[in-house]
Amino acid sequence: MCGICGIVQFDHAPIAVEPLQRSCALMRHRGPDQTNQWVDKSVGLGAVRLAILDPAHDASQPMHDTSGRFHLVFNGEIYNFESIRRELEALGQTFRTCGDTEVVLIACMKWGVDAMARFNGMWSLAFYDSHIERGFLSRDRFGIKPLFYSSRSDGLRFASELEAYSALDTTNGDIDTAAVRQLLRFGYIAHPSTIYRQVCRLAPAHVLEFEKGGVIGVRRYYDPNSVISPTPASYTEAQFQLRSALDNAVTARRMSDVPIGAFLSGGTDSTILAYHLQRCMGRPIDTFSIGYSAHGSFDESSYARSVAASLNTQHHELMLSEFDVIEAVPKILDHLSEPFGDSSIIPTSLLSAFARQHVKVALSGDGADELFAGYWRYAAHDAWQAYQRMPAWLRSRLIEPLAHRLASSRGGAIGNRVRQLRKLLRANSPDPLIRHIAWSRIISEDVSQSLIKACDDGGLDDATVELANTITAGYGADDPMNCILAFDLQHGLPADMLHKVDAASMMHSLEVRVPFLDPQVVSLAWGMPSQWKIDRGRRKRVLVDAYRGLVPDIALDRPKQGFEVPVGEMLRGPLYGLFRDVVDRPTVESCQVLNFDAVERLLADHCSRRAEHADILFTILSLCWWLRKQ
């Protein structure tokens, strides 16, 4: 696991090594074990390394072939590198190292961009052929590892983090106000946008090809729709295939020359991964969880403890105080190279820091919700249809007025139900995809109209709807839920969850692997009808049934609980002062998007419990913190 950066001058101007050194220094948390740069005329590459496989010096980066013609910087892991190596050896290739980086280098030498389809792993990389002055950038299929770049007439610049990119180009350009609006609506900025108008985020499953005269183009090398597995012959057969695919995925991801463990919340996804990792390791594995002593409704530690005891793992538990969370917030906001609105980055960072004390690699269950319909908003479609069948007078005269009068909060069962009902009422479209996008937003239409200046989209992000229709065009209208899952897998997952995990874990030099995003698992899930995934409100149906009797029932039957900290409650108390200090009128108005008076009303409504605005308030805090750093 590493961080990479590079400069390619299309005008053939010579490159100094100092910008690459500064960029690498800003990414040292991603790779504290080694750092190096390479410059040859108008091309320069840099890398920092977190040594997981083959920690020998010969495996350091940038890596070059024996002839000195081919060059690579690579961030990630290729889990099937040994089989690719054997294939290359059969073709006459020889190797100096034992790890995956040299396999990636020689595979790119042999097959070029076509090598990407052979890799099972997570990566961002840059490959360059100095003889023909041509190369490419690439990002893994699902966007587990990030890559930022800009392309102008004079050259190409790229880096694993936006702040590291800034060291290569001091003229980032203007803030992208469209990206800020997306951030305020959804809590994240999705590819290809970044907070800067001139800087792009390479999309998952894409390559950017360049030559000495400029960028050739950006194209997709993998489409999940083109590799869907045949639908299993029966529901029982689907369960068997799923267990087999996940066992293979976890077994492939156990490869490491350093200690490895697993995050364990006690929920379905993390329990399944811990079960498989324990089986393939043949000994008690290290598992990690955190809890909150002062906020029981956010505390999953008892579930994790129970599952760990049942699986007989070597369990490590960290109980957090309110002070621990408050102390972490400024450090995390300082670490972010662009604003990010998902407050679950706080517990993810704290868990990563805790796990890093014991291991260098951890497994995480990210991706399972998008593959097997685990989120509340997937079940909400049935609830919405049931609600529409109620008499109109009952909805308009009783339920909706009551929903807007009752207190809304994540901190209690009733308040959370009110919050979910208000969110349900946001959507009023017969199109499931449009309803889904409305529920994915962190603010309602009326809040959007008052908060965001020049917000003329009628409450729905037209660009997002258009993108969703494009992504799901090949999935067939006969199964709208699978279309929704396809959109989330390719849009929200890389922009939100995977971005969060990468930023939070690499902040502490911890590599996190995500077995549910193994191509075989994804292909198998893609081939299943959505009724096998969600049925009458029962989410992750096939996944739960596949592991009934193999893992503790408590992990399969407990209600889904988001991995969160009580940010909403803290904004009403110990984080209130920080928010008021950071989110002041000059800072808010400097981004030219937010209405400061509307922000004040949101905070007042939240503190009085007239509404639950934790998501948008944390997003605004993150945005203003970032603005003040500029």
Image: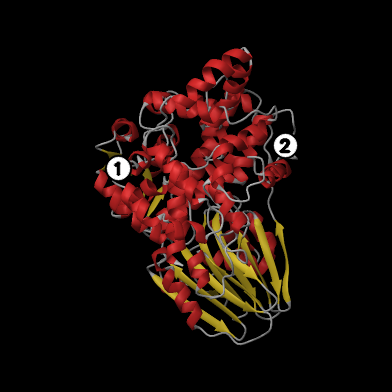
Picture quadrant of residue 210: bottom right
Left/right of residue 116 with respect to residue 305 in the rendered view: right
Q: Is residue 427 left or right of residue 505?
A: right
Amino acid type, label 1 = Gly
**Considering depth in this image, is 161 or 38 the residue closer to the camera?**
161
Classify 87 as above or below 630.
above
Identify the residue shown where x is 60% and y is 65%.
199
Determine the residue positioned at 32% across, 54% down.
Answer: 356
Q: Nearer the viewer, residue 83 or 136?
A: 136
Instruction: Kindly identify which numbered label has been placed on residue 573.
Output: 1
Kind of residue indicated by mark 2: Tyr
Q: How far separated are the C-alphas under marks 1 and 2?
A: 47 Å
Residue 438, percent across and down? 60, 36
Any part of residue 79 in sight: yes
Circle count? 2
Judge by depth and name the residue closer to the eye, 445 or 112: 445
